[in-house]
Amino acid sequence: MPTDTDYSHRTAVQKLGVRPGDRIEVVGDVGPGLRRDVKEESGRGLVRSGELDGAIVLVESIEEGEEVLERYRPRLRDTGYLWLITRKRGREAYVNQMRLVPGGKRRGLIDNKTCSIDDDRSGIRFVVPRALRKKAAADGDGNGSTAAAGPARR
């Protein structure tokens, strides 16, 4: 029988999947220390323009979520991710994350993970489906990897 996985020992930046060398943009009140932790894990400063491996953005309404999805989708690498951070249920400016999913789908993104960031915030991750990634179509293996060996990046 399946059991619940305990992620309480993992830091927020580990849950978000930040990798060394990632080009990441962080926007909004995403919680204390998250920006610092993202920079530390990626080993570089945050970016404000250009192509992205990831973006972590606070949204406080469905409309704002739609705007963020529209603004960031063209900048995401095929293997990139967009975390929409929202306030948790019971907090001011709470957004039901499931109401953000249709906006992602309209832009060719799928939601594939949620996680708790801290006591006040949680996130939902959007990615380009493997079948729609340019590299997957070019190399034919479906995982976006062009190398013969080594793990494929998301």
Image (spheres, helix red, strand yellow):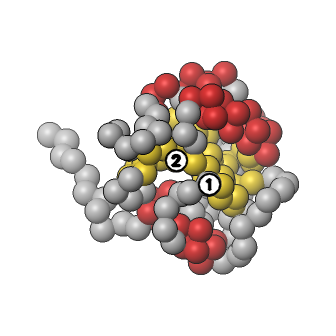
Decide if residue 115 is in sight here: yes
Q: Position of residue 13 (x, y in %)?
A: 49, 65
Mark 2 closeness class: few <14, some 14–19, many ≥20 residues within 10 Å: many
Q: Find residue 94 and name its label.
A: none
Indicate the quadrant where residue 60 lies. Answer: top right
**Residue depicted at 63% across the width and 73% down the height:** 39
Three-letter amino acid code of the residue under disc 1: Gly
In the picture, measured across the screen, residue 35 lies left or right of residue 75, that is left
Q: Between residue 42 and residue 72, name the one nearer to us.
A: 72
**Residue depicted at 76% across the width and 38% down the height:** 71
Q: Find residue 28 and name its label.
A: 1
Mark 1 closeness class: few <14, some 14–19, many ≥20 residues within 10 Å: few
Q: Position of residue 63 (x, y in %)?
A: 63, 28
Which of pointers 1 and 2 lies earlier in the amino acid sequence?
1
Image height of 35 relative to 69, above or below: below
Which of discs 1 and 2 lies nearer the camera? The answer is 1
Judged from the image, the secondary structure of the residue bearing numbered disc 2 is strand
Q: Position of residue 29 (x, y in %)?
A: 56, 57
**Residue depicted at 58% across the width and 74% down the height:** 36
Marks 1 & 2, CB-CB < 8 Å contact:
yes
Q: CA distance from mark 1 to mark 2?
A: 9 Å
In the picture, measured across the screen, residue 116 lies left or right of residue 86, that is left
Q: Write down the residue under mark 2.
A: 85
In the picture, measured across the screen, residue 146 lies left or right of residue 55, that is right
Three-letter amino acid code of the residue under disc 2: Ile
Q: Between residue 79 and residue 122, name the one nearer to us.
A: 122
Q: Between residue 78 and residue 30, name the one nearer to us.
A: 30
